[in-house]
Amino acid sequence: MTIYIQLFFEFFKTGLFAVGGGLATLPFLTDIAERYPWFDKSMLADMIAVSQSTPGPMGINMATYAGFNAKGIIGSIVATFGLVLPSFIIIIIVAHFLKKFRESKSVNSVFYGLRPAVTGLIAVAGFEIVKLSIITLDKFIDTKNILDLFDYKSLILFVAIFLISRNSKKHPALFIAIGAVAGIIFGL
């Protein structure tokens, strides 16, 4: 199977099953990072930062970035097309049957069941990113010192950005820029 077919298929699956928006793609992208050499988990964290700070839907930005990283411009087009095609097909079908589905208890129950499932998947992917960004497990294993479990500069930045962004309505790009500047200043 050529890399273009793999890119299309993997991102088609992601687009088909990542219900809930851009963050819902994270578990799928984590899985892709583990199974293919296109990008690793560290690059995934970078992709998230870039996708959050660029215009457009995060999931599409991430597919474009991953596809470009794997196989250049054609790869980015293939991955992005693979990601959006399932939504396009589903929207056409749902629009056709919208009146019938709108009042269906079964369909509403499916969506209420999807919410906690998607939230759980996003939480797992988020935890993986926290491990990459804040936790220094290798250092802790080497020293057996509990104080070596965290990168404290990163932890302080994480908590500060979390609290400030939770309590303000500032654009995520501002926090990405603050993180980038802090990374330069504090050598993160």
Image (cartoon, helix red, strand yellow):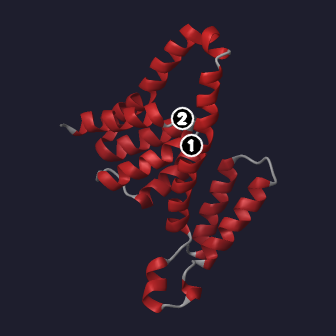
Whole-angstrom CA distance, mark 2 to mark 1, is 7 Å
At numbered mark 1, what does the secondary structure look like: helix, strand or loop?
helix
The quadrant where residue 127 appears = bottom right
Compared across the picture, whether 17 is left or right of 185 comes to left
For label 2, the SS is loop
Residue tagged by mark 1? 118
Whether residue 121 is situated above or below residue 20 in the rendered picture: below
Q: Are marks 2 and 1 in contact (CB under 8 Å)?
A: yes
Quadrant of residue 89 in the image? top left
Residue 56, horizontal then vertical, whole percent: 57, 34
Quadrant of the snapshot with the C terminus: bottom right
In the rendered image, which residue does mark 2 sit on?
19
Q: Earlier in the sequence, mark 2 or mark 1?
A: 2
Where is residue 51? Give x, y as percent: 54, 45
Q: Residue at x 42, y 24 (%)?
A: 85
Crowd class of label 2 (few under 14; some 14 to 19; many from 20; radius 10 Å): some
